[in-house]
Amino acid sequence: MQKKYVFMFDETRNPNSESSLFLLGNKGAQLAEMTNAGLNVPYGFIISTEACNKFYGSGKKWPNGLGVQVKTALVKLEKKTGKKFGSVKNPLFVSVRSGSYVSMPGMMDTVLNLGMNDETVEAFAKLTKNPCAALDSYRRFINMFGDVVMGVPHSKFEAALDKVKEKAGAKFDTDLTVEHLRDVVQKYKEIVRKEKGTMFPQEPWKQLEMGVNAVFLSWNTPRAVSYRRINKLRNDAGTGVSVQAMVFGNMGNDSGTGVSFTRNPATGAKEHYGEFLVNAQGEDVVAGIRTPKQIDEMRKTNPKVYKELVGIYGKLERHYRDLQDFEFTFEKGKLFMLQTRSGKRTAQAAVKVAVDMVEEKLISRQEAVLRIKPIQLDQLLHKQLDPKAKEKAGLIASGIAASPGAAIGMVVFTADRAAELSSKGEKVILVRNETSPEDIEGMNAAQGILTARGGSTSHAAVVARGMGKCCVAGSNDIAVSESLKQFSVQKKNIVVKELDWVSLDGGTGEVFLGRLPLVEAEFGGDIKTLLVWADSFSRLAVRTNADTPEDSKRAREFGAKGIGLARTEHMFFAEDRIRAMREMILSDAPEQRRKALAKILPFQKKDFFGIFKAMSGLPVNIRLLDPPLHEFLPKEEKEIAEIAKEMGVSVGKIHDTLSALNEFNPMLGFRGVRLGIVFPEISEMQVTAILEAAIEAKNQGFEPVPEIMIPVVASVEEMRSMKELVERTAGKVFKEKNRKVKFHVGVMMELPRACLTADKIAEFAEFFSFGTNDLTQTTFGYSRDDAGKFIPSYIEKGILQEDPFQVLDREGVGELVRIAVKKGRGARKNLRVGICGEHGGEPSSVEFCHSAGLDYVSCSPFRVPIARLAAAQAALKEKRKTYFEDV
Amino acid sequence: MQKKYVFMFDETRNPNSESSLFLLGNKGAQLAEMTNAGLNVPYGFIISTEACNKFYGSGKKWPNGLGVQVKTALVKLEKKTGKKFGSVKNPLFVSVRSGSYVSMPGMMDTVLNLGMNDETVEAFAKLTKNPCAALDSYRRFINMFGDVVMGVPHSKFEAALDKVKEKAGAKFDTDLTVEHLRDVVQKYKEIVRKEKGTMFPQEPWKQLEMGVNAVFLSWNTPRAVSYRRINKLRNDAGTGVSVQAMVFGNMGNDSGTGVSFTRNPATGAKEHYGEFLVNAQGEDVVAGIRTPKQIDEMRKTNPKVYKELVGIYGKLERHYRDLQDFEFTFEKGKLFMLQTRSGKRTAQAAVKVAVDMVEEKLISRQEAVLRIKPIQLDQLLHKQLDPKAKEKAGLIASGIAASPGAAIGMVVFTADRAAELSSKGEKVILVRNETSPEDIEGMNAAQGILTARGGSTSHAAVVARGMGKCCVAGSNDIAVSESLKQFSVQKKNIVVKELDWVSLDGGTGEVFLGRLPLVEAEFGGDIKTLLVWADSFSRLAVRTNADTPEDSKRAREFGAKGIGLARTEHMFFAEDRIRAMREMILSDAPEQRRKALAKILPFQKKDFFGIFKAMSGLPVNIRLLDPPLHEFLPKEEKEIAEIAKEMGVSVGKIHDTLSALNEFNPMLGFRGVRLGIVFPEISEMQVTAILEAAIEAKNQGFEPVPEIMIPVVASVEEMRSMKELVERTAGKVFKEKNRKVKFHVGVMMELPRACLTADKIAEFAEFFSFGTNDLTQTTFGYSRDDAGKFIPSYIEKGILQEDPFQVLDREGVGELVRIAVKKGRGARKNLRVGICGEHGGEPSSVEFCHSAGLDYVSCSPFRVPIARLAAAQAALKEKRKTYFEDV
């Protein structure tokens, strides 16, 4: 029996199956599915991908039988439409489209109106009573076919058209008369003859053959091949070809065309939404010359079609079980569906539709959870600039959308000024070349942060996200001068001075001059419902990175199941503490250091107590001091002089310490556990503060669950030594306070060596928490503060698919995580494993954490909902195992 | 049958076997072996380690039968010696010593003269006719036994002795009379009674029991347990106890004692070497009150003993097959061997003895090769400061022994000054806080380098070793002031000014004031012979890291089999090139950059040509540009102004570029392949220069074997892109020159991610060369420029066993190497794999490279002989598989 290569739209039982998708291509499968759904789709047929593969297998010739099968299908198509291919009375025109198992946008253009020639166009002109439209269709067809199928440069046609328009004094294509258009058609045909040495094919069957061949050949253009390589698509899949009858909305007032959504895509409300034009084709809607009408007006103009259309909404949603958008055309009162797809919607609409559809029993809770892109939730949690106002306002600069939300305030250029004005109730935007830990107070005081340098994981970006504060980072458009108290935007010739108002959109990275109005955001209702469902499917728990009771409370409201990372160093920058910290650093002997540390202890204890209280009953993972000590010392001469005076030491002494602590590569320097080993009294103080705070919390009736985390560990000996220190200190505290609390000691896994020796480290660590920021830095050898110099270029050139500081690199960093989990659990069965890097709130990375078998992810408070959703999706996707699905 | 716990010295057939070692302990096995060798060792017996383990297994009691076996052994001992334990006529005294399967120095002191009491001491006094000596032995015994066995603090005895000496007006112990000594003995016994509430045991058998128990118990002192933990020794091995008859050299003029070597340990010459004292005990030699005589004088004083002794030399060497040192005592004309061991020797002697012994057929070539510690060869390759002169001269400061050899010169503080004076024929020492690439010319001009900061892998150290130039790095003793042109040594209150003379010993890290005389070193003769033998056993080849034809030639003389790393960046710092380099960096567009690069090309080509010529027939691995571009830019305002003028750009422009290129963590910044991807024209120029130079060399009849190495690769996409660039460029060059050369493209493996994805990278890389310096930095997260702040403390606290920048870390870095080799060879069977980090010349690291299956190591020229020897030893050791052997 001969192989079946050609399938009519209504010939496929299960067009949604994987095998259909591979056989028919996505476009063909879609058309077959719409037909199966009982939608009135213009009829047609699909040439399978197998035909395409055979075509390549046999020297670029149609396989045996394909010709006969296409001709048979064409006859069926003619019968169904009542039109005839090449007929000079009622001609059939068709579209020819490509389509592989996944969409490869831009690989091959569509050819419309195939079947037109010098004769059929005249027949069409008579039928439509619109010779202009007919001729315009014909000249477009010659252009499209000439370009896509025959390889005549589009520009040649363009030039000819322009010449005619110029001569005719016509501004738009639509200004051309029938005579002009006949001239254009003539010229187009001549171009084809001149360029290709052959006449433009008049024979419709020949046109079809050539069109099909062109689609086949487009599968292996260099562009398509490299697209597949980059996107890791199968090279052996081949493309299908769909051939579909054209329908026309420009056949009179009983004809028309339109676009609609089954629900409101902006709000999610269940209402008709869309627009249409009578006696028009799709291009007319796009061209925007005539103003389309709202769908509901059709009730008056075309009541029969309207009634049918209203039925379509329900039919589509029942079949596709989602908010759909669709294109339709009605030809002489007959409604055709041209295309439908899942409708794009705002985050708000997405959540409302998903929750509503569960209530309408259209979809399951699982499906609802899978419907929302986790990252969309970000929009729902931050105040937004009013989109309408943005359009009107002047965009003056762009940068990296580092931390979403909106911020409006007066520009200031130092952290001190920000704090000063903020304390007076002013709203300010802190603008810096880049921020440093000393700017923390100012950042906290500001509405938003704008920096000229640094990327999506720069200090400004990380801290801002941690604070849930709007931040536009690394805006190359601006030049900041702290001394002149201004920033300038050269390409706009604008200078913005201190106290000028600006508005930032941290979700898009836009900077506007002036005060734009805001739109409120809220966490509750549908989104809360959805996330409760999500949690029920997740294997991963979601914790938060929080350093203060306020952040802890907020994160808990967002559903965090504990703290995965409480940094202790931010606590040292407040004015009352930094002095004692500096005194400690400038001490020469352990005793002197202990004295200075004793002053810091009550502050730390208070901080920890507040966090234990806010997180009562949930684990609180506290990381011991991490950054190099020089970060705490003053850098400016004036400050140095002040501190020297205060502390009664010489300026030279402070300079000596600064120079001794200065580092070539601070990221790889004297920090983390290295501080704790060399200066054990620092760790002793911190552990004492943590455990005393926990005892105090317990005494007051809270349930503290402290976890003590050792940072920057590279070897088991460090961990052994710190574990001993913690236990020794705990013994002392418990004896002194005459009360015990349960606590855990674990390790921040952020160096390759720790991962490679995880089995040994797990002997002394009760938990692992992957610090994937630093692990990414060391695994790639990228400094995240410097990688901005080459990462954009790397992404542009395809060396990197994504910024590994944003999306966890599964191949390298992920391999270390897998190695560490395997070795760690091998040595300690009940080892708790989490992640606390920035990746903890990034959906693809959360999915990786799920698949790597982690117990939890931890992220900044505002990312908690996103991570919860991503965790649920990872669990649900794993069950489905549909590798090509991209929800 | 009862378990045998006690072995007479002559009862063990094969004392050298592993099982004997574990059964008898190292000390016991040694004594048994000496006895077996026919040496007249004072007789005795060994209590096995099994007895010790049973002791612990049964509540610290002697196992059944041990008491009887010890008593039986004692009777045999009495019979053999003709003396009797506790006899008041001819008393037997014994020593009691510990000994486990490996030496644990300092774990347990020896107890000598056990068996002495108030009565036997009098008998001994009569026999020796020397009551003073007898009583002195007795009081020493009480002290030793009281301290070691009974736990009376040594200080108590010391105080009592001092009191008696003071009262007697005696300066030395030997000034004491019999009466004084009797007083001391009495006081010592009282101390024991007071401290322990018990009499000093007079019963010899009781003394023996207690002595044996003390040895058993010493196995589990906290000190011993932690020593085993740190050194990874077996906790279940137990200690043996050897009980041996004492012999006495102080029995008159027919008695004596001495120490000798079987050959001259300084030169290796085959001659009698050593000294002796008549009528004396070992302590007398050590005490240094009487001057010992040269061995050959014994021919006159004790001819019979001398004749016997001469026979011993040959006997020892035939048995031990090595240069031995040994201690002997003759008691009434009878010669006893007390101890022998492999004699410590200079590098020169070590090599000569090994080679001579092969010629004497005492040992095989394999054994000769295994005899030399590779690191010793360093001494043979560099000029040395005369050791005698060093003793007399004033040591003013110490630092890290960064690069061996000696250097004598006038102190200068800038590279320019060094170059200036050197060009006038002056010898200078460059003293800097630390060096930077801009100092290269000055370092090259200097005799040696002294820095105040930086460690064993600092810039100064690495470059100096590469140049084979003496360097003392990171001397904390000195404070350098470039502006005052001086350095000061506070603790010596010395200021050294420009043009003062100093002498450096790079092998010890010592700095001396003044000009010390030198001793010459030479590469040839025995050492060459030995290394030829070594090469015949090696699996690893040894290449060199060399950037110049001079270094290449030198390394080839030292036996290098090619270049494993030619850095291209050092080539840019000469004055005629740096300008073009800076022009390139300051260029805004690829075209401008290409123009500047075109100026550099001829220089690079010339450099490469010279290297290909010097290394004709051997592979030359050239690494493309590695360091961040800012290293090439001037830092000082004056220089910046000059360059701006020269290049016709504004000073601001240069500042802008400097600030744009400035990096927080340059080690993890915009460098290596990242430069090549973002600015492909740089790599194109370098590849062109390499291949044009190779063609030129080929045209002139040489055999160039170029390998092009891509640095700092983290992902396969980088490698793919660079491979394409190299091949594209090669095609162009070959076409232009109308000639081809074979070349290879490979990758420097220096980032964890490269190792983890080695299978993918190997698809595009023909070779891997591990850059273990950077790989260590990223694996540990240690910046080698900053790690000096904590590595010393880490080593002191036992967190690190060794500086991982000196000795390759097998557990972490090594694991990445193993992963990469496995994955890489899995993807490309004939992948060539080497190492070019500093570790390539470090013996333990070379051994690792051998076991990891690498093809070669590469190291600085002066390390080549060391690596050759280490490579051979690794191969030989692998065959022997004696895991406890430490040659």
Image: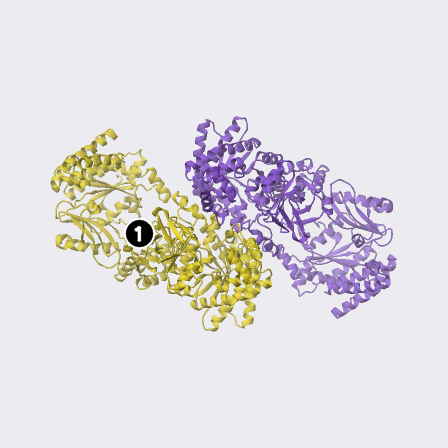
Chain colours: A yellow, B purple
Kindly identify the residue that appears in the image at 53 percent across and 33 percent down: B608
Residue B14, visible in the rendered structure: yes
Q: Relative to B10, is B350 above or below?
A: above
Q: In the image shown, does A605 or A699 lie closer to the viewer?
A: A605
Kindly identify the residue that appears in the image at 23 percent across and 59 percent down: A270
Q: Position of residue A780 (x, y in %)?
A: 47, 48
Q: In the image shown, does B875 or A543 lie closer to the viewer?
A: A543
Q: Position of residue B29 (x, y in %)?
A: 71, 52
Name the side, left or right, on which A170 lies relative to B847: left
The residue indicated by pointer 1 is A394
Q: Which chain is home to disc 1?
A: A
Q: In the image shown, does B482 or A208 lie closer to the viewer?
A: B482
Three-letter code, disc 1: Gly
Number of numbered discs visible in the structure rendering: 1
Name the side, left or right, on which A124 lies relative to B828: left
Q: Where is residue B235 in the image (x, y as percent from the top left)?
A: 63, 58
Q: Which of the 4 image quadrants contains residue A113?
A: top left
Name the side, left or right, on which A35 lies relative to A619: left
Q: Relative to A105, is A670 above or below?
A: below
Q: In the image shown, does A613 or A886 lie closer to the viewer?
A: A613
Quadrant that contains the N terminus of chain B: bottom right
Q: Where is residue B862 in the image (x, y as percent from the top left)?
A: 62, 39
Residue A84, visible in the rendered structure: no
Q: Relative to A136, is A295 above or below?
A: below
